[in-house]
Image (cartoon, helix red, strand yellow):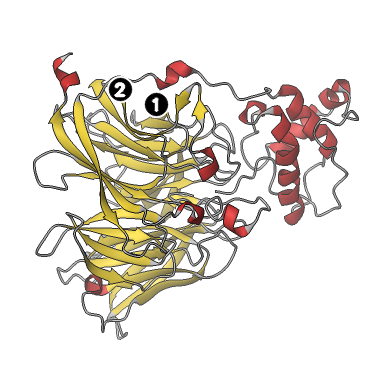
Amino acid sequence: MVCSSTRGRGRRSTAMAQSLWLAGVHVLLHLSGCGPADKPPAVLAPGSSAAQPAAAVAADEPRIRQFCGNCHAMPHPDSFPRDRWYEEVRRGFDFYFQSERTDLPLPAQTEVVAYFRERAPEQLAWEPESFQSTPSPVRFDRRNLWVMDDPRQVPAVSYLAPHSSGDEPALWVSDMRNGNISLLAANGSRVLRRIEAARHPVTVWPCDLNGNGRTDLVVADLGSFLPEDHQRGRLLWLPDGARDPEVRPVMLLAQVGRVADVRSADFDTDGDEDLVVAEFGWHRTGGIHVVWNDGVAATAEGLAWRSEVVDGRPGTIHVPPIDLNGDGRMDFIALISQEHETVVAFLNRPAGFEKVVLYAAPDPSYGSSGIELCDVDQDGDIDVLYTNGDTFDSELLKPYHAIRWLVNEGSYPFREQVLATMPGVHRALPADMDGDRDLDIVACALVPQKQRDSTVGGVVLEGVIWLEQTASGRFERHPLSTGAPVHAALWVGDLDNDGDHDILTGGFYEEEESEGKTPAVIWFENQGASPAASER
């Protein structure tokens, strides 16, 4: 949830558009982020009668395609309505002139604008049939699990995770706006512990770095709520989950850009946990780090750490570890957004990490928002659930926002299968929601406030849906929440210990939306079979 907007509006009106991910949470470099720093030629405003003749544009098409598709996929003209292309081309050239490359032939901006406008639709086309749904065979009761005590604190919940140890069931809740990490009783009755070690915590990862059998927390700290290129991002280790207030947090990574995700795994097979870190950054900062745990050392925290940059691109959202090729060494998979829009496996070889592309989106404005690893078809290998629904770059809902299954068929790249269209989809997780022993999928969406009452294809926007797997690889759509896509965080599990899967979502609101208390955590309680199940 680390989205980024480059629009020049007032701070309050763009706080939401400039802040999100993670979830991300992604700057849109549509055309080229590389080129000579010469003064740009004049650009005509939309609707100007002095546009380039079609013949002139056609003659310069090879240069336009070379320039606009050199660093990433060539943008599709139908990814924006016709009247938006003037602004998108202008932004692309702005990035071009801020870079230091000088090896690309430079087309006239007027010709680039004309090229995309001539090929773009008047409006983006929606297909109402892509939103077809059926009544849910499982009944869910929605309730506010936790409403913050202070109405002045507008929640921006970016992460939810179960607390695996303690005397009672509990949940970690990370609020990336207010800087709070709260341990919430599973019934929402009270906050058991509150940690304020990070400025803007976006991910809280439970692990055991020192091997003492107690759960530590590792926190990805953005360093700023709004997107910036800075060096205030941090990775913090809270030994034993900060149970003892006298134990100070340990800084594992500092003076980096906005840190969006962290995961743990034993990458060097030495018996302790190392860390892989997604530094989302923004324009000029970002990358992927492996932080190696070198074991006992004469330091205050008793461990020695060293960091290695394994990829220098900005925009990484998630970095889940997995032994993808079954060689006994832990690999990881990274979702890299920005103009890259790609899912990459980092295979752990003896000589270092080898990068293998599992999926490359067809357009640099695809809006990647998250990945989750799971065996969707239960064939014994790991697939990838991939979502692309980020709307905070352009504040534009797009017909290709969707939940996608990247199918592992034993070779690279993986095969893409679209499971459901969902504007603004931010997160998708697998779970057996109906107890039939296959994996269904739960997804949530987050869109800017100005879009939340929108309809697309005559359908009101959905905040939470679940996809029932009715046969292998076939899914039916069941909406659970409509008209309020405010969910950046998602967790699925048995919250009330009654043997079925419940759904928790985190509320992510703009400050203008605060009218008293707003729910930080919402519970969709699984009540078992609904009347719709008996009608099948």
Residue 475: mark in rendering: 2
Contact between marks 2 and 1 (CB within 8 A): the answer is yes
Question: Residue drawn at (77%, 44%), measured in percent from left and top?
Answer: 104
Tell me: 481 left or right of 259: left
Residue 420 marker: 1
Q: The residue under label 2 is which amino acid type?
A: Phe
Q: Nearer the viewer, residue 391 or 431?
A: 391
- Residue drawn at x 13%, y 38% as measured from the top left: 500
Q: Quadrant of residue 526?
A: top left
Amino acid type at mark 1 = Ala
Residue pictured at 70% horizontal, 44% vertical: 32
- Would you place residue 3 above or below residue 455 in this image? below
Residue lying farthest top? 536
Q: Is residue 441 visible?
A: yes
Residue for point 82% across, 39% down = 109
Say whether disc 2 or disc 1 marks the residue closer to the N-terminus: 1
| 435 shown above or below 195 | above
The residue nearer to you, when weighing 354 against 201, is: 201
Q: Position of residue 191 (x, y in %)?
A: 23, 65
